[in-house]
Amino acid sequence: MGKLKVLPAQIANMIAAGEVVGRPASVVKELTENAVDAGSTKVNVVVTDAGRTLIQVIDNGCGMSAEDAQLCFERHATSKIASAEDLEEILTFGFRGEALASIAAVSEVTLRTRRPEDETGTQVTVGNFGHMEVAECSAPTGTNIAVRNLFYNTPARRKFLKSDNVELKHIVEEFTHVALTRPDVAFTLTHNGRDVFVLKAAKSLKYRIQDLLGAGVTGDLVDISAQTSLVEVSGFVGRPESARKTLGNQFFFVNGRYFRSPYFHKAVMNAYSEMVPDGVTPSYFIYLTVDPHSIDVNISPTKTEIKFEEDSVIFQTLFATVRETLGRNSFGASIDFDTEGSVEMPQISRSFGEYKNSEIAPSHEFDPSYNPFETAGSDYVPDFGSGTAPAGYNPSAAVHKSENYGALFENETAAVRKAMIIGGRYIATPVASGVMLVHVRRALVRVLYEKTLRALEAEAPVSQTALFPVEVPVGAANVPLFAEYGEMLLRLGFDVAPFSADSVVVNAVPEGYSSDEMSVRDMVADLLQVLSDGGHNVLPEMMQSATARKFAELGALRYAELKTPAEATALLDDLFACSNADLTPSGKRITCIVPIDEIDKRF
């Protein structure tokens, strides 16, 4: 007897579910896309405990017959494909018939559905490792599907889910992708009884973007539009000055389907060349329309990767379209050849005529009897050299130079002798063997690293500087992160709290951080970059050092620039109080000594 055997359908579905259902957000994506494919004008998504306990999607679409309601849980049951040729004309979200079978294999599912022409609806319950129960029920037109206890029968997969706030962030992202494809459909998203989004059918795509991401995002967008024989490009791109460090609000869609493409992302970034600094990314919402025969959407189970037949041509079209739009809106550099080399004349104000014929010279007053040397009770006699004292000089009223003269300058003089700032990037200080050079940013990284590490190990917040509250838009998907890590941030001196559905408020920043509004916004972007890594849930153990290093590196960038020798001296004192003053946590050198004989060679 051979060793090979065919797996039971339920086990095969559980294995397949690993490709389609990675986390609760995957279920939200599949069910919401199915609801839109059903011709719905209203879709409600209800989530409890970030999808662990319940994911429910309710639509007013076409509904299903009793036969289809049962068949939809069979793997590869689909109404979208009847032949191989149909794969080349896919214009819907779902088409492989894997989603419901995979979801039902790792959860308990209840489906209630009714078509407009049916008097009663159908209820299908799937659970207990594939056991199905079917009954008639009363139901409105459309489909109501509830997924409970996700991964109840695969505890290892459930164990590896992240915190509720992280999982909710992914759910919001998937919900956003679908909502951006259909502004004509009303959507709601509710989590633990609280509305996250209530989106009415929008008059245009820009209104949908505003409802989802806020007016601050849409205010920085400009339209793009182009049409060729291969591709039609439409949508919006962000102004260069609104580009941010964190990746967010970058969306590609093709034929109404969201997809990811590092290749096309490069085309957009090339269009912004020399308009944005390195390390920042502009927002964009780019919609491509192509012949369905020229793309393959069937190359990944999640259908977020798409193969284009003429990708290089689309790359060039995308680059040219974005570049032309930026230039047309005067974001790019331009030269006026008609005025090149001419003298630039100042602008004359309307009130110039009031003064152009005036011959009245400005008046000034002076006191001829004023003597700057007169100070009662002084006995200091200045040395005028071989010259004579100025008229009116009174020796008995001269400035007195006591034994404490210059005490005001002693601290500054000592600081100058100890530390000198070079180009804002280095500190030079004398040592016995020559001159020590200290890299300012790397020194800050080491100091902040050890300070952050102590703050994470302790339970008390570090000192903070007062700040007028600053509201910073971060997107609805990212607000939960600041809620989850708020206590940790507070220990580090960042008082950042959720403010609205898509923004946070910054009440305080650590001592030494720049507190102007623009710096605070940049700081929040840096924090978001650190928090999005998702490794902080094991901070008490090995991730503590790595997290402290990330915070130290972003802190060094956001610290106010050293301006005085006294500030440089204070940094040196902090550096040499560290456990390792020579290297940053990542191993980069902080200090070096230029010996005296090396200096001698320069003369």
Image (cartoon, helix red, strand yellow):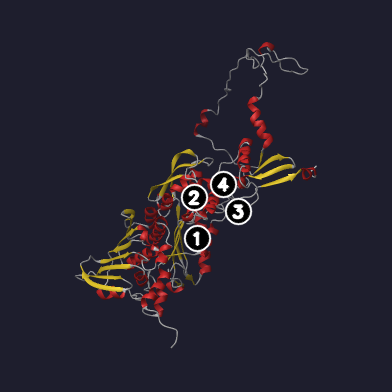
Per the rendering, the mark at residue 278 is none
Given the current orientation, which residue lies at the most extreme bottom position? 1
The kind of residue on which mark 4 rests is Glu
The kind of residue on which mark 2 rests is Leu
Instruction: Work out which quarter of the rendered image holds the N terminus and state it.
Output: bottom left
Q: CA distance from mark 2 to mark 1?
A: 33 Å
**Quadrant housing residue 171:** bottom left
The answer to whether residue 522 is visible is no
The kind of residue on which mark 1 rests is Thr
Considering the numbered disc 4 on the image, is that residue within a helix, a strand or a loop? helix
Query: If you read the primary sequence from the N terminus, does the residue marked by circle 2 or circle 4 appear first?
Result: 4
Verify CB contact (< 8 Å) between mark 2 and mark 1. no
Per the rendering, the mark at residue 450 is 4
Q: Tell which tag, 2 or 3, sits nearer the viewer.
A: 3
Query: If you read the primary sequence from the N terminus, does the residue marked by circle 2 or circle 1 appear first?
Result: 1
Name the spot of residue 366 as percent of width and height, x first: 60, 17
Q: Which residue is denoted by mark 2 in the rendering?
A: 527
Q: CA distance from mark 2 to mark 4?
A: 18 Å
Q: CA distance from mark 3 to mark 4?
A: 13 Å
Query: If you read the primary sequence from the N terminus, does the residue marked by circle 3 or circle 1 appear first?
Result: 1
Considering the numbered disc 2 on the image, is that residue within a helix, a strand or a loop? helix
Per the rendering, the mark at residue 586 is 3
Verify CB contact (< 8 Å) between mark 1 and mark 4. no
Name the spot of residue 356 as percent of width and height, x first: 55, 29
